[in-house]
Image (cartoon, grey):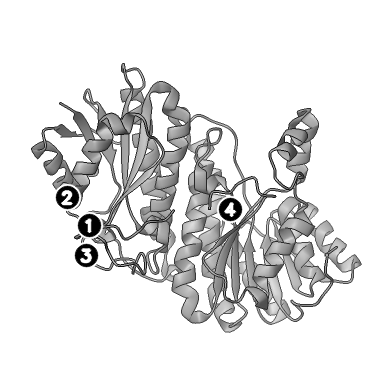
Amino acid sequence: MTAIGVWGAEHPAIAAIATALASAGATVASAVSDDEVGMEVDAVMMATWPADGWRQGPIAEHTDDELESLWEQPMQATIARLQASHRALAHRDGGGRVIVLVPTFAMSGAPELAVAAATAEAQRVLVKSAARQWGGAGITVHAVAVDPALAAGQPGAGGTVSIASPALPAPDAAAVAAVVLALCGPAGAVTTGGTTCVDGGVWMSP
Amino acid sequence: MSRAADHALGGRTAIVTGAGQGVGRGIAIALASRGANVVIAARRAETGEPVAAEIRAGGGEAVCVVTDASDRTSMVACVEATVERYGALHVMVHNGFRGAVPHRLETSTDADWDPMSRTAVWASIYAAQAAHRHLRAASPHGRLVLVTSPSGVEGSANIPLYSPVKAAQRALAKSLAREWGPDRITVNCIAPVAETPALAGAFAATPGLKAAMEARTPLGRVGDPVLDIGAVVAFLAGDDAAYVTGQTIVCDGGSFLGL
């Protein structure tokens, strides 16, 4: 049975994914703080999505307080959580899995959500840096990019990600949970630093 | 100092942050050699004034405006001083950066993160905010260029927190390309590798490093800040690139082929 520590469950979609993970047989619990997982885990999952969604607006209007909220605080939280993940997993036999959830507009950019897109892409690439440094400790690090509607709680947030039409039905929390669990299994032990898109097959680049 | 002397940017005005040396200086010289008025936005007059003087000695037009790109007030003052002097702003290039000291992610501290976050991301946003209305007024010639890195695509094993701030710049460029497209402003990134004073120092300190870099570069050499990097920014600043936006142009001799 996989034990997963979760950050970000104050967001309804993350809470739903956590519930789906539990329904699929995982043991799931919220981390006690950004600096500590607080339990023995095989894997951690994290997201910094604001519970009430991102406020859309032109970049020209963002104040320093908004930049703190959209960029600095989520990035500092992500760094702290990754460090806590390392402390929890580095000395385990077999290491562990770190999974960071981002909206797919990390890769496409998002008009009027430029700073949120910057944060998401920064988190996605920080996954790559962590993967490069922590592979020797048996820790693999993965990004899961989801439909922005799931992350923002509203359809169309950040505009269209691609001109392509979805190849599959719109994914729900259970679909994301299935991918997270797969990354907690053998596939996640032999891959690292990559991004798996769970968005109905819209973003397919590269 | 350009392969093709022309005045493609005649009548245009550009700001280049971090232009007191290295890639920034190369970009400033390249833009000026093509006719642009160039504002050297450097943190210290001791580094910025010589570049402005160098450009003027070559027949170009340039001034130094001491600017801390990571400070909103300073960036706004730089833009306003530019527009007051030259009547317009057509091209904003944010190149200034501080940080990139090797570290381990699991033990990194604010000392590793803060300078990179402030000078890469906050400063890019401040540059965009300060410049936008002037770039829009300069339509269809408005250009924003951010200097990023291939590390912003593939992560870094040595400087892990460098990669996300460089990645953020790419996402900002894509987002603003879409947000400002209706204003006919193009927004792009370059990811350069050039022999800057810092890299030259590394070459001097580590025998064999330059040869190793050259060996892994398909074009077999390390780039020149003016001819190889500045020239690309000059292209992006000009009319030939009017239909290029949201992109990252990697100028590194072919070392990175991940896009």
- Relative placement, left or right, of B144 versus B110 is right
Instruction: Say which amino acid is labelled 4.
Output: Thr
Disc with the residue nearer the chain's start (2 vs 1): 1
Residue at the image point whose x is 54% and y is 69% from the top: B245
Q: Are marks 2 and 1 in contact (CB under 8 Å)?
A: yes
The answer as to whether the residues below labels 4 and 3 share one chain is no
Instruction: Say which amino acid is labelled 2.
Output: Ala
Residue at mark 2 to residue at mark 4: CA–CA distance:
35 Å
Q: Which residue is mark 2?
A: A173
Residue at mark 1 to residue at mark 4: CA–CA distance:
30 Å
Label 2: few (<14), some (14–19) or many (≥20) C-alpha neighbours in 10 Å? many
The answer as to whether the residues below labels 1 and 3 share one chain is yes
The picture quadrant where one finds residue A1 is: top left
Residue at mark 2 to residue at mark 1: CA–CA distance:
8 Å
The secondary structure type at the circle numbered 2 is helix
Q: Which residue is mark 4?
A: B148
Residue at the image point whose x is 62% and y is 79% from the top: B141
The answer as to whether the residues below labels 3 and 2 share one chain is yes
Label 1: few (<14), some (14–19) or many (≥20) C-alpha neighbours in 10 Å? many
The picture quadrant where one finds residue A67 is: bottom left
The answer as to whether the residues below labels 2 and 4 share one chain is no
